[in-house]
Image: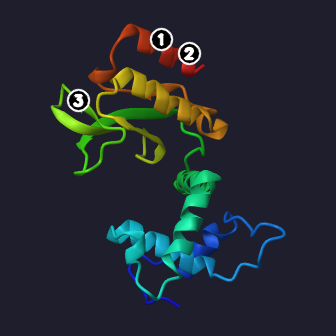
Amino acid sequence: MSKAYPSNLTHAQYELISDMIPEPKRGGRPREVDIWEVLNAIFYVLVEGVRWRSLPGDFPPWQTVYTYFRDWRKDGTWLNIHDSLRDWTRIDIERHRSPSEAIIDSQSVKTAAMVHEGVGYDAGKKIKGRKRFLTVDTLGLVLRVLVTAANAGERSGGKKVLKRVKQSKKQVSRLTTIWVDGGFDGEPFMQWVMNFCR
């Protein structure tokens, strides 16, 4: 059992998402690790910003924790947990589960030293690094994120992140309005967005 770190899930929080954690694969070895501890270790890495290898020894082995993190990213478990929590948050404040409006924005950020993959130069912001495209509902809850090289254009990145939103049908079943700033301006993009919302 790990110590009571500030990043640990409470019992109630764990119960809320535990049904979304995949069962062990059939025919394999029985699961010996406590999934609550695995989740606490993953959140410790995310909150504290440490390397996987720097996990404190009272958590499960870092290789085990990282394998669960990677597998759940690949099989969509994290996305399912995220989308469910967002939906529950909207319902809890008496909003429809599916938003009718969304907002797109982007931000260019410098990359750390020695990072060369997916890096570009944003001439407008004079930044060498990556660009984050973010789509949120009007409450600020994230729909989807896209990370590109910083030289990606606003309109092309905007289309790509909206396509990610559209991949989840329940997210866009009511989506009719997309808010953007001047960087996304242009008649072809606006027409594309109008067709997207139909």
Q: Is residue 127 above or below residue 180?
A: below
Residue at image position (54%, 29%) is 163
Residue 81 screen position, x and y as percent:
59, 58
Q: Which of the 4 image quarters holds residue 88? A: bottom right
Where is mark 2, residue-wise? Answer: 195
Tell which circle, 3 or 2, labels the residue nearer the N-terminal end. Answer: 3
Secondary structure category for the residue under label 1: helix
Q: Is residue 3 above or below residue 178?
A: below
Task: Verify CB contact (< 8 Å) between mark 1 and mark 3.
Answer: no
Residue in the foreground of this view, choosing between 172 and 24: 24
Q: CA distance from mark 3 to mark 2?
A: 29 Å
Q: Which of the 4 image quarters holds residue 126? A: top left
Circle nearer the viewer, 3 or 2: 3
Residue 166 screen position, x and y as percent:
59, 32
Q: CA distance from mark 1 to mark 2?
A: 6 Å
The amino acid beneath tag 1 is: Gln
Residue in the foreground of this view, choosing between 40 and 96: 40
Task: Verify CB contact (< 8 Å) between mark 1 and mark 2.
Answer: yes
Whether residue 91 is visible here, answered yes or no, is no
Residue in the foreground of this view, choosing between 170 and 123: 123
Tag of residue 191: 1
Whether residue 1 is visible here, answered yes or no, is yes
Tell which circle, 1 or 3, labels the residue nearer the N-terminal end. Answer: 3
Q: CA distance from mark 1 to mark 3?
A: 25 Å
Q: Is residue 69 above or below residue 157?
A: below
Secondary structure category for the residue under label 3: strand
Where is mark 3, residue-wise? Answer: 122
